Image (cartoon, grey):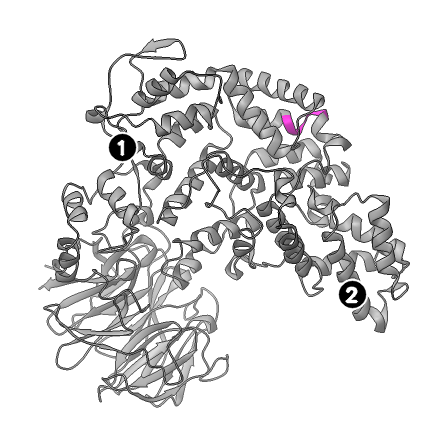
């Protein structure tokens, strides 16, 4: 059996956390087998989408669309698939523009391409209606170029500044002329006016218009030819800067906010895999998750939980959303005040992650949301923790024992001596915890309070 | 030979947001709007020529409706409105003045849990699809409980979250057995007679049927909600025809478009029946992209002139088809 702490670490990073029972099951099958299971998503399960659609005609519009995604993150059988969708949303952010359906369709596209070739992912991104409209490629015509998408593709979505010239940007944009939406002008007018008339929203789809494509010869990153958008993605995917870009971003999202010497070596290994696998993201992730760095003690708790990760983790762990029809237990509304409203990134650069998540005034929001869930012994996940404590050693526990059990079962969370001392001091009020007989109800409340206090510790803010 | 010809579309242009409709004796349409605002009251009274006769207030007696899902007239032309979220029936006159109410949440005899359809028989008793109790209940129009049948399951006479129901000219009851993907037919007392359909996208198959209506020849029209189409079955349940919708601009929709020249110009240059990529080939995606198609069918009706009315609520309209004998 693999180490419980290591599997819990993997599930926090490659998913949204797992209950102790789930962690034990994964541990029984072994670490590498769990990695392979994560990398090969199967049937995601039933999210009650038919019921959501029956109960609300606008079930996929506005905030309801994001509620659907939150429900899916909570209940999906494919945690890494949803985590990758979240990663790609942050990497290729678009801001909500009048149509929730377009964003849900974009998420489906991310899921389809999350484990395939980076080149294919860029092609899918470049033909995604929400992205095309967000970055104005519908205005990129053979006789009137708009370089907005072309610039962001090379600057923010692949190689980064310093790896291309202004001419490359223009040539890139030329190659994407004719990549647009169906009925682009009508859809753009409606989106601009947030119009739902005369008969409700018309969802967007991609359309290639050969009559609006610049067929001339282009020179891009030193290569010359009659390039179209797919050729550009081919060239970008070959670039060392692109390999390092995607591998570094994956490392920072899944392994550590800060890249140290060990991290750089791991990224080097990921880059090697990137090329040997034909740019396959699944293979790159396999290299990352199986790396010594990722599995090391050093990597644990080296990332600040993003608001969506924090909230979904808490809802999953506590069982606050017992089935999809029950909704996301407030998850959708909670992440915005913490600084991460999905599809409302601050800019096309996405969110600034890492310690910025907790250095703002959002810390109190984080603590309040999570503590409220863990304080409630009626939540199934909290009940499971209490039942495990009750059955672990006779049912009566000193404050120290109670704190250690809670730290273990809620994570495990690795608390500093100072943090542990504060927790024990808190737990000592009221003496031993007795989970037998008549006093059990009061003691369950005390365990809930200790769990809630753990969620307020600095250590709990890290994944 | 059976055929249905498209006649016209009523709705759009922010005038109505229909979920169900009822016909008054003088031929007016009483449209129950699932949402108010954006130009729509709770009830819109209009006619075939798309004249809006009156907007009626959102009067549920003790306030406003929460989630009204069905409207039907009794013989006295009192308007019965079923509220799924309030688990009750509200009775209004034709000016939406409150006359009474009945129904309470629960699972006992006569109690309701998210009821989703209400229709009258020839004796002026009414049948209610009791969604979360997975049953059908029959009441007098004053709310006196008469009988019930059904329980959760997929056997004959069982239901999984029934949605719509309707009666034929013999008062046999047809139920859209939503999560069982079938239509069930019963005697007026609830004796099982037949079940039509199974899960799927093929002819005679259903994906979460929402509503059903039967004409005077016994043809059964099914709102095949998940497949975004109407299917027509013969009296024995055999497949006859299917419709995907072909809405055109209503008078109200035309007025909206004419008053927004930028939308008019770009719309006229658009293809409203687009070719879609493989990943958008499901019925839901096709309807979400194809404005003339049905999208979210919540109610079907036939009138005494052999017209079929299809309420596709997500597109804020209903489409009318003429049956040819």
Residue at numbered disc 2: A444
B218 vs A13, left or right, is left
Q: Earlier in the sequence, mark 2 or mark 1?
A: 1
Q: Position of residue A420 (x, y in %)?
A: 84, 49
Residue B274 seen in render: no
Quadrant location of the C terminus of chain B in the rendered image: bottom left
Q: Mark 2 lies on which chain?
A: A
**Residue A30 versus residue A141: which sits nearer the camera?**
A141
Q: Residue A333 has which mark?
A: none
Residue B109 seen in render: yes
Q: Do the residues labelled 2 and 1 touch (CB within 8 Å)?
A: no
A341 vs B59, left or right, is right
Q: Is residue B71 magenta?
A: no
Q: Residue A139 has which mark?
A: 1
Report the residue at 58% width, 18% height from top: A271
Quadrant location of the N terminus of chain B in the rendered image: bottom left
Report the residue at 35% width, 77% height from top: B82
Which contiguous range is marked in magenta?
A: A288-292
Q: Position of residue B44 (x, y in %)?
A: 22, 73
A89 vs B265, left or right, is right
Q: What element carries label 1?
A: helix
Q: Where is residue A318 in the image (x, y as percent from the top left)?
A: 66, 56
- Give the mark toward the camera: 2 or 1: 1
């Amino acid at each position: 059996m693999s180490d419980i702490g290591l599997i819990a670490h993997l599930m926090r990073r490659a998913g949204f956390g797992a209950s102790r029972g789930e962690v034990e099951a994964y541990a029984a099958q072994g670490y590498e087998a769990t990695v392979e299971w994560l990398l090969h998503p199967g049937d995601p399960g039933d999210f009650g989408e038919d019921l959501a659609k029956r109960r609300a005609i606008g079930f996929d519009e506005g905030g309801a669309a994001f509620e659907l995604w939150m429900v899916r993150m909570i209940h999906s059988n494919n945690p890494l698939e949803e985590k990758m969708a979240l990663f790609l949303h942050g990497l290729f952010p678009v801001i909500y523009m009048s149509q929730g359906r377009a964003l849900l369709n974009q998420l489906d596209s991310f899921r389809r391409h999350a484990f395939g070739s980076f080149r294919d992912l860029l092609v899918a991104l470049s033909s995604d209606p929400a992205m095309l409209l967000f970055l104005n490629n519908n205005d990129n015509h053979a006789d009137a170029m708009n370089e907005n998408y072309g610039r962001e593709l090379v600057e923010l979505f692949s190689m980064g500044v310093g790896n291309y010239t202004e001419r490359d940007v223009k040539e890139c944009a030329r190659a994407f002329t004719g990549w647009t939406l169906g009925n682009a002008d009508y859809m753009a007018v409606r989106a601009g006016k947030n119009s739902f008339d005369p008969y409700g929203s018309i969802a967007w789809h991609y359309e290639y218009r050969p009559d609006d494509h610049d067929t001339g010869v282009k020179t891009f990153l030193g290569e010359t030819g009659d390039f179209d958008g797919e050729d550009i993605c081919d060239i970008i995917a070959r670039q060392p800067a692109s390999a390092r870009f995607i591998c570094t971003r994956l490392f920072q999202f899944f392994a550590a906010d800060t890249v140290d010497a060990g991290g750089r070596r791991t990224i080097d290994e990921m880059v090697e895999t990137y090329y040997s696998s034909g740019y396959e993201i699944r293979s790159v992730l396999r290299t990352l998750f199986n790396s010594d760095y990722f599995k090391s003690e050093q990597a644990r708790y080296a990332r600040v939980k993003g608001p969506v990760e924090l909230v979904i983790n808490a809802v999953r762990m506590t069982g606050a959303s017992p089935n999809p029809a029950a909704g996301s237990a407030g998850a959708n509304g909670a992440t915005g005040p913490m600084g991460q409203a999905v599809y409302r990134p601050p800019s096309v650069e996405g969110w600034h992650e890492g310690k910025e998540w907790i250095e703002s005034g959002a810390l109190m929001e984080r603590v309040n949301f999570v503590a409220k869930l863990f304080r409630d012994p009626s939540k199934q996940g909290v009940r499971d923790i209490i039942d495990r404590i009750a059955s672990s050693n006779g049912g009566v526990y000193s404050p120290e024992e109670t704190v250690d059990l809670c730290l273990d079962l809620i994570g495990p969370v690795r608390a500093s001596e100072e943090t542990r001392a504060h927790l024990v001091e808190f737990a000592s009020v009221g003496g031993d915890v007795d989970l037998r007989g008549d006093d059990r109800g009061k003691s369950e409340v005390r365990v809930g309070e200790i769990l809630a206090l753990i969620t307020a510790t600095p250590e709990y803010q890290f994944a | 030979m059976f055929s249905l010809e498209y006649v016209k579309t009523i709705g759009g242009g922010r005038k109505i947001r229909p979920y169900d409709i009822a016909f008054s004796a003088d031929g007016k349409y009483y449209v129950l709007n699932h949402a108010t605002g954006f130009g729509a009251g709770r009830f819109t009274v209009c006619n075939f020529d798309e004249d809006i006769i009156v907007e009626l207030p959102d009067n549920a007696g003790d306030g406003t409706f929460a989630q009204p899902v069905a409207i039907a007239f009794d013989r006295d032309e009192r308007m019965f409105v079923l509220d799924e979220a309030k688990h009750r029936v509200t009775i209004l006159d034709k000016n939406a003045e409150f006359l009474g109410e009945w129904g309470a949440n629960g699972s006992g005899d006569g109690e309701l849990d998210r009821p989703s359809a209400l229709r009258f028989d020839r004796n002026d008793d009414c049948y209610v699809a009791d969604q979360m109790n997975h049953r059908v209940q029959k009441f007098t129009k004053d709310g006196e409980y008469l009988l019930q049948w059904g329980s959760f399951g997929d056997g004959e006479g069982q239901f999984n979250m029934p949605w719509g129901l309707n009666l034929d000219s013999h008062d046999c009851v047809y139920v859209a057995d939503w999560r069982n993907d079938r239509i069930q037919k019963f005697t007026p007392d609830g004796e099982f007679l037949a079940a039509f359909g199974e899960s799927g996208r093929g002819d005679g198959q259903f994906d979460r049927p929402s509503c059903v209506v039967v004409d005077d020849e016994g043809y059964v029209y099914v709102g095949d909600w998940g497949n975004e189409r109407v299917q027509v079955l013969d009296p024995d349940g055999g497949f006859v025809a299917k419709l995907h919708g072909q809405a055109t601009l209503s008078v109200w929709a035309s007025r909206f478009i004419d008053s927004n020249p930028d939308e008019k110009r770009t719309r006229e240059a658009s293809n409203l029946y687009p070719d879609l990529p493989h990943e958008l080939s499901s019925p839901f995606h096709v309807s979400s992209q194809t404005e003339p198609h049905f999208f979210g069918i919540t109610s079907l009706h036939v009138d005494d002139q052999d017209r079929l009315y299809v309420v596709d609520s997500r597109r804020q309209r209903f489409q009318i088809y003429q049956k040819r004998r």
